[in-house]
Image (cartoon, grey):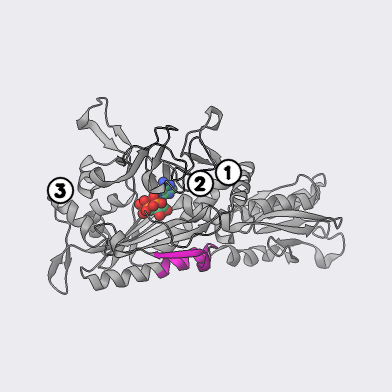
């Protein structure tokens, strides 16, 4: 739980525009909206779900397919309660909470200077003069019951992180993966935290998704520090590959006195969101804390046998832990742009564009027949659609003026558009027959491309 040292100017207006675009274009809706919503819960609409899937697929590919040393797993959300006792979550996974007796709102004690007072929204609880209770620890884990009897013995938690499944399955995975150290396990999945103050759109939700890596390494501190730096660099490169430049990420090297008790080194990667500089991902060297805790509590050995050194030990671990929803939000904030352009009649208009990196764009290519009532054009456009949709997400749009259709796709962040016109049909001569106009979203440049070379032109641009 950290904040950056260099506060940035807030841009509430930009954030409002992004939230409104997300709803209007179907990226993100409030959960249970028709019933007034549920605080801290969000639904991803048609574009949002594609964006989120693309981010997760991209992360997964970079972590597993493109490497030899990492394998994946998918653990259950419900786990034996003993897991959370051993991990320390049952006793220590809490935030300090205070109640305001004046406005009756509840706040995180460490966020009094950034929260909003319940009675005077222009003030913070730190300045409103409210009457607060002493701070109390509030455990963030959601409780539920497994089976028909609701008593202490059937109590279980919704996991507050995905990591623990990878620790408790360490031995099973190690045996089947037949890997030597260093090796890692990755997982993507839902996590739940009963946050005291969900806020800043999806940034702090009660239900969210994580992408976590547990990277197991030899048991020396020198190795731990080296691999933490290695993963810092790898993760920065990954963010760059999805369109979040290093210059927008603040690396918070958590000072020793603020480290969690099990960590010898932690970097928080913080993004310059419009509402401030906030954590996107934590990269923590967790020593052998987790495996040791589970070995002691379960009585089952979780050691690694080093064949060369003929020595058994509990591996240490470096954990890069990223939030899917926070990554998606950072991508949206980074991609959002408004610019003045000339429309077809030469009039100046404002175009809203999401400049997504093509590899994570929800729709890769728009397909536009110039007219929808000309059967030959429509047939050709459908031919192009069928050619491309086998390889990428596409959107077929035949409604309205072509300029309007381009704008709609600009707003959806679609990097490419293909227009099928009379030239495609060969009406202006054989040399243009079976060519289409390929439009690039950011430069708005258009070039003529043969239908037969469309795939080879687009594929290298949308894959990384
Ligand atoms: P914070 O300080 O913001 O509460 P944290 O340090 O508790 O975060 P971790 O436990 O390190 O977070 O979780 C790893 C990642 O999971 C975070 O970097 C973030 O991307 C994501 N995450 C954690 N809590 C939430 C939440 N309430 N909503 C959305 N994403 C979250």
Q: Can residue 331 be seen in this view?
A: yes
Q: Which element is circle 1 on? A: helix
Q: Label 3: few (<14), some or many (≥20) within 10 Å?
A: some
For mark 2, what is the residue? 200
**Secondary structure that dominates the magenta span:** helix
Q: Which residues are the magenta region?
A: 233-252
Q: Kindly report the distance in space between the C-alpha atoms of the residues bearing marks 2 and 1.
A: 22 Å
Q: Label 1: few (<14), some or many (≥20) within 10 Å?
A: few
Q: Which residue is at the front of the view, 397 or 125?
A: 125
Q: Which element is circle 2 on? A: loop
Outermost residue toward the front in this view: 129
| Picture residue at 57% right of the left edge, 54% below the top | 332
Q: Is residue 187 visible?
A: no
| Picture residue at 53% right of the left edge, 29% below the top | 36
Tell whether position 230 is magenta.
no
Q: Which residue is at the front of the view, 254 or 338?
A: 254
Tell whether position 237 is magenta.
yes
For mark 3, what is the residue? 298
Task: Give the x, y percent position of residue 208.
Answer: 43, 45
Tell me, for residue 403, which label it has, or none: none
Q: Where is residue 25, by image quadrant?
A: top right
Q: Where is residue 223, by image quadrant?
A: bottom left
Q: Kindly report the distance in space between the C-alpha atoms of the residues bearing marks 1 and 3.
A: 44 Å
Tell me, for residue 46, which label it has, or none: 1
Q: Which element is circle 3 on? A: helix
Which label's residue is closer to the chain start, 3 or 2?
Answer: 2
Find out if the beta carbon at label 2 lies less than 8 Å from the nearest ligand 1 atom.
no
365 relative to 201, above or below: below
């Amino acid at each position: 739980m950290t904040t950056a040292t260099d506060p940035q100017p807030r841009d509430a207006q930009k954030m409002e525009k992004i939230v409104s675009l997300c709803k209007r274009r179907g990226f993100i809706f409030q959960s249970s909206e028709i019933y007034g919503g549920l605080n801290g819960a969000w639904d991803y609409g048609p574009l949002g779900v594609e964006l989120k899937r693309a981010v997760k697929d991209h992360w997964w590919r970079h972590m597993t397919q493109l490497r030899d040393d990492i394998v994946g797993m998918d653990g259950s959300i419900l786990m034996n309660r003993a897991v959370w006792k051993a991990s320390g979550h049952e006793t220590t996974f809490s935030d300090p909470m205070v109640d305001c007796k004046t406005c009756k709102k509840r706040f995180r004690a460490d966020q009094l200077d950034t929260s909003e007072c319940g009675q005077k929204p222009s003030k913070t609880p730190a300045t409103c003069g409210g009457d607060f209770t002493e701070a109390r620890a509030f455990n963030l884990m959601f409780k539920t019951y497994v089976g028909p009897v609701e008593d202490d013995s059937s109590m279980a938690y919704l996991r507050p992180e995905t990591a623990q499944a990878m620790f408790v399955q360490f031995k099973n995975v190690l045996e089947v993966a037949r890997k030597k150290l260093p090796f890692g396990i990755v997982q993507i999945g839902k996590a739940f935290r009963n946050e005291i103050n969900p806020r800043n759109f999806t940034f702090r939700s009660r239900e969210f998704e994580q992408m976590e890596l547990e990277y197991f390494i030899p048991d020396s501190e020198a190795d731990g520090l080296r691999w933490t730096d290695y993963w810092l660099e790898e993760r920065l490169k990954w963010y760059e590959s999805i369109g979040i430049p290093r210059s927008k990420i603040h690396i918070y090297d958590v000072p020793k006195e603020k480290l969690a008790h099990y960590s010898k080194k932690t970097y928080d990667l913080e993004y310059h969101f419009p509402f401030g500089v906030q954590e996107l991902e934590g990269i923590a060297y967790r020593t052998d804390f987790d495996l040791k805790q589970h070995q002691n509590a379960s009585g089952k050995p979780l050691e690694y046998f080093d064949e060369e050194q003929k020595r058994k030990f509990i591996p240490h671990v470096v954990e890069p832990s990223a939030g899917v929803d926070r990554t998606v939000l950072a991508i949206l904030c980074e991609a959002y742009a408004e610019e003045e352009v000339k429309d077809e009649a030469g009039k100046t208009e404002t175009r809203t564009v999401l400049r997504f990196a093509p590899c994570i764009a929800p729709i890769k290519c728009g397909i536009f027949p110039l007219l929808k009532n000309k059967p030959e054009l429509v047939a050709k456009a459908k031919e192009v659609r069928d050619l491309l949709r086998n390889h990428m997400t596409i959107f077929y749009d035949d409604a309205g003026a072509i300029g309007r259709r381009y704008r709609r796709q600009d707003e959806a962040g679609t990097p490419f558009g293909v227009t099928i016109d009379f030239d495609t049909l060969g009406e202006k001569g054989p040399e243009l027959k079976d060519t289409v106009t390929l439009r690039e979203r950011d430069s708005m440049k258009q070039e003529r491309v043969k239908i037969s070379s469309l795939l080879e032109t687009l594929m290298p641009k949308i894959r990384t």
